Image: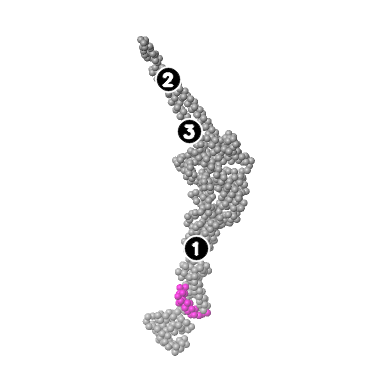
Amino acid sequence: MKNQLIRIALLLALSGVAPGQVYTPPSPGKKPNTTPTDTSTTVNRQQPATKSPFGEEIPLLNPGDETITVAGITIPLGDNRIMRSRFEKYLSQPEENSEDARIYRSNIDRILADLSPYRKGGPDIKTAYQTLPAASAFPADARICMTLAEAVYVAMLAKRDNRNLHKLNTALEEEKQKRIRDGDWKTRHDRDQKTGNVKSTSQGGGEQKNQQNTEAKSTGRGAQSLEYAEILRRIVEVEALKKKNIAQSEVQELRSKIQYQANMALWTMQRRYQHVLMASRFYNQIWKDGDAALHIDKNSDVSKMFSESLGVNPTVSTLDSIANEAIQEVNKAIEAVDFLLERDELHTAQKRLLEAFFIGEYLAPVATLELEKKRRIQLYVRSLFELYDAMQAKNYTQAQELVDQLKDTAKDFPSAKAESAITGYTFASNMAIQGAKAALLEGDKDKAKQEVQAAAEIWPTNPKLQEFSDLVEKSGGILVARNDFDRLLREQNFREIFKRQYEFAPAVKDNATKLDALETVIKNILKIDTTIVVARQADIRGNSYAAWEALAALRSQKEFSKDPKLGEEIETLTPKVAPFVDALQRARKFEDSRRNQTGSAIAWYLKALRIYPDSEMAEEGFQRLLDKVLPENDLLPPASGSSAEASVDPADGTLN
């Protein structure tokens, strides 16, 4: 199981996000990107760093690897949008159950069966090769079977050329051996044309002659001949030709292997696993020398990936094993999809189908999955991506609706984290709006602006933002009224406050201090106006003294002293009661004088009482001074009922 997982991981790393029929090699001078795109659906256990105060939210987009996470489920977008679009296109396509598709899959199975080592009589490479063109006619094959046929043909040509070179080397070897034999014969039998040395011997008085021939040592004969030199040169030339042919044969075989293996690696990346299996079995029949190692750079990232993950150098059998295990994984994933769909567990079903599609997009179990089943998953995935888009746009109202919809559709939809994020963000936005309202009522415009901006950043589509906007629009006059009230209160323009009391009342109703000030102003102005009305009625009846005295008594109070209307009314009545007013003013002047002029003050109060006997101001002044002069004034008759006449010296105002 461990090896299987390692190989599947390796498979995903190799498959990446390469399009079905396009391979883009890395640019010269640049190292290829070795980080594989994770095309599996995984649960993100580790929470990403977040500045949000709520924690445990849904990270929306990771631009580094272009993955999205919804409710803790990380889903890659493919290369990344390309793979997502291809998956969505797959979900909307009908299953491949036509007669042509059935024939195509039957041809693939027949080719694999003909190349199987367990076939009775052994693998039949010729029959398998003849079936490839028929398989390539199916559109979904994208003529890869024809590409495989061409690769096999080129490899067979290379093998045939190697056989021809071998025959040529055999002929050269025969020629070399013949030359060697000719050279050996020449050196052994070629002699000089001499009679040789004669040695005389005598026995018994007789004479005997012995003639002996010697090896040819003269130029033009034996080892000294040009013919012998040509034999040696040709032997060396033949040996060089043999070595050249051997090297050419090895290079040609290696080149054909590399080209063939490059196709296998490309088909593995394109997730054409059945074609990888066919190519692997053709390979084993074409090259039976046991050399199945992949000819790749030992320092390349692909080589390191194989050696580090599997601990061995990659071979053709490695690709064959990867293809077999990928096919098995796809079969298991599709079985799981069927099982989960029967139980309405769409969330897990879409993950299993996503894995099956990314691993084996072109395999039969994926291609033949019923359209009705894919349609159910498509609608769920669409809602899932809509939820992602809603969370990305911070439209939490729509996001909550989608969460509810997904929960009803899929029994296994994990909604906890999504709902937690939605609740946290909406609550934070609502609280920010409440803070903005409070700041607005307090007149703190800057704080209100900050709170509203924070609420809009958290939840731009918060319906309470519109409510706040309407409140601001309606409360624009309230803010102006509140500012005007504060200004008029500082200026002590109470008449204007009283005039606009119905405008100021809503503006200050939430501020107890300002509300109390408004109520006090209204009460005082009403008292002033009431007194003015009563004074005017008294003046009309001819009692101008009573009218003036009532107004003057009111103005003497601090809270009424600066009322302009009260002052105007007093000024209007003053000419009519000038003597009385003059007497009261003189009496008050003498009373407040630093010199002891109490008598003069009493005299002027008495004069004011003569002018207007019912004057309360004159009576109070007289009684006040009388209490000061005669503490026992309770024995004296009342001043108003006294028959004594008092006169005042006009020169100095003293009492006579």
| In the foreground, 593 or 387 | 387
Q: Residue furthest front?
A: 204
Looking at the image, is mark 1 or mark 2 earlier in the sequence? 2
- Which type of secondary structure does the marked residue at label 1 adopt? helix
Residue 344 placement (x, y as % from top left) = 61, 53
| Residue that badge 3 annotates | 251
Return the residue nearer the eye: 495 or 643: 495
Which residue is labeled 1 in the image? 435
Q: What secondary structure is found at the residue carrying circle 2? A: helix
Q: Residue furthest right?
A: 99
Which residues are the magenta region?
Answer: 541-563
Which residue, as the protein is rendered here, is positioned at the far bottom? 635
| Amino acid on which the number 1 mark rests in the picture | Gly
Q: CA distance from mark 3 to mark 2?
A: 42 Å
Q: Secondary structure at mark 3?
A: helix
Q: Residue furthest top?
A: 205
Q: Is residue 652 left or right of residue 549?
A: left
Q: Quadrant of the C terminus?
A: bottom left
State how the image is colored: one colour
Q: Amino acid at mark 3?
A: Val
Q: Which residue is under mark 2?
A: 188
Q: In terms of sequence position, does the residue under pointer 3 or pointer 1 come before the other?
A: 3
Whether residue 529 appears in magenta in the rendering, the answer is no
x and y, in percent, of residue 17 in the image: 52, 45
Task: Return the residue nearer the eye: 354 or 522.
Answer: 354
Q: CA distance from mark 3 to mark 1?
A: 81 Å
Is tag 3's residue or tag 2's residue first in the polypeptide sequence? 2
| Residue 449 at x, y percent in the picture | 48, 60
Res 422 visible: no
